[in-house]
Image (cartoon, grey):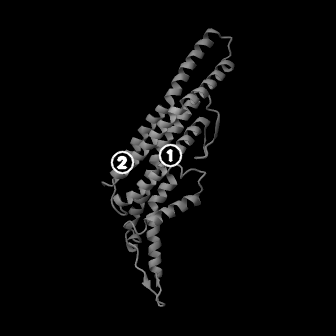
């Protein structure tokens, strides 16, 4: 807990230097979990969010925790026994952020498969979230997912789950490491499942269209497949994306709900360690 204010020689309450150092140590230790989450979670870990902004977010969220949660004494935090505690705090925050990243990657995977099936795999730009080269359709799906994530206050719900984990998983308490591993594996399976849900309406039609183009070019060899097939495939892809955008939003909204549910399940399972 926070140290009591000791009256100084002038009668004004104040803190001794040792108490101030201990308070700073408790504050930094409490910031490990939420800071690791902010540095690894979707939206917060995007390249368009600068590192100073992430640090400010972590500090502001930790200020809200001070005085509410139970923090070990500074003497315990300064001992070598606190090293495993720090590793566990970082593991919880990173696991929570990476779980959301894994599930959100299904949108990029679906966009990449659609782009490659349509022959638009070379139409790549720098992804503003990761800074890597990725097809434009994958970036569109990811930005759409982030927009739904923010619109439905998913980022606030994720932060609330991490902050509530300080009650179920106090600092220094043992955790179930297998729960973090199982959550990652379950998230990976959900990622492939949701990616298939997102891409199958478009990919299935494009597959049939490619078969039709192959039959036509086989029966009429004088037709140039690049002059005939590529414009038709690209036009069909844009038309299919336009027609399926209304059904895309509910699937992405369901993906956000699944991500938050798995995050709550992971933190609850780790608390039973």
The disc, 2 or 1, on the residue closer to the chain's N-terminal end is 1
Check the image and report above or below for 189 versus 27. above
Mark number for residue 228?
Answer: none
Residue in the picture at 47% in, 55% down: 37
Question: How dense is the environment of label 2, judged by Cα within 10 Å: few (below 14), some, or many (20 and up)?
Answer: some
Residue at which label 1 appears: 149
Q: Position of residue 127 (x, y in %)?
A: 61, 43
Looking at this rendering, what residue extends furthest in the bottom direction? 9
Residue at disc 1, secondary structure = helix
In which quadrant is the C terminus drawn? bottom left
Depth-wise, is mark 2 or mark 1 nearer the camera? 1
Camera sees residue 239:
yes
Camera sees residue 91:
no
User: Dots 2 and 1: beta carbons under 8 Å?
Assistant: no
Q: Position of residue 155 (x, y in %)?
A: 49, 51
Looking at this rendering, what residue extends furthest in the top direction? 219
Which quadrant would residue 22 be assigned to in this image?
Answer: bottom left
Q: Position of residue 97 (x, y in %)?
A: 47, 51
Residue in the picture at 43% in, 55% down: 160
In which quadrant is the N terminus drawn? bottom left
Residue at which label 2 appears: 265
Total numbered labels placed on residues in the image: 2
Question: How dense is the environment of label 1, judged by Cα within 10 Å: few (below 14), some, or many (20 and up)?
Answer: many
Check the image and report above or below for 262 versus 160. above
Residue at disc 2, secondary structure = helix
> Whole-Å distance between the Cαs marked 2 and 1?
19 Å
Q: Position of residue 241 (x, y in %)?
A: 57, 30
Which quadrant would residue 189 be assigned to in this image?
Answer: top left
């Amino acid at each position: 807990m926070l140290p009591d204010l000791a009256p100084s020689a002038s009668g004004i309450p104040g803190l001794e230097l040792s108490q101030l150092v201990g308070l700073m140590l408790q504050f930094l230790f409490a910031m490990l979990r939420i800071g690791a989450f902010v540095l690894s979670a979707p939206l917060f870990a995007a390249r368009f969010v600068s590192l100073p902004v992430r640090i400010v977010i972590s500090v502001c969220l930790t200020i809200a925790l001070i005085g509410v949660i139970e923090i070990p004494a500074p003497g315990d935090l300064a001992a070598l026994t606190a090293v495993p505690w720090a590793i566990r705090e970082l593991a919880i925050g990173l696991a929570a952020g990476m779980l959301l990243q894994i599930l959100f990657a299904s949108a990029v995977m679906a966009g990449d498969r659609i782009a490659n099936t349509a022959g638009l795999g070379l139409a790549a730009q720098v992804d503003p979230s990761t800074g890597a080269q990725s097809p434009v359709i994958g970036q569109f799906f990811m930005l759409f997912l982030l927009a739904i994530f923010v619109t439905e206050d998913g980022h606030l719900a994720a932060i609330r789950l991490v902050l509530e984990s300080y009650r179920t998983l106090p600092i220094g308490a043992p955790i179930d490491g297998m729960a973090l591993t199982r959550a990652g594996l379950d998230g990976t399976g959900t990622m492939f499942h949701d990616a298939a849900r997102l891409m199958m309406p478009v990919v299935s039609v494009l597959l049939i269209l490619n078969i039709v183009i192959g039959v036509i070019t086989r029966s009429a060899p004088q037709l140039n497949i690049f002059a005939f097939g590529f414009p038709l495939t690209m036009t069909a892809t844009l038309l299919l994306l336009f027609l399926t955008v209304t059904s895309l939003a509910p699937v992405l909204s369901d993906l956000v709900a699944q991500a938050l549910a798995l995050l709550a399940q992971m933190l609850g399972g780790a608390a039973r360690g």
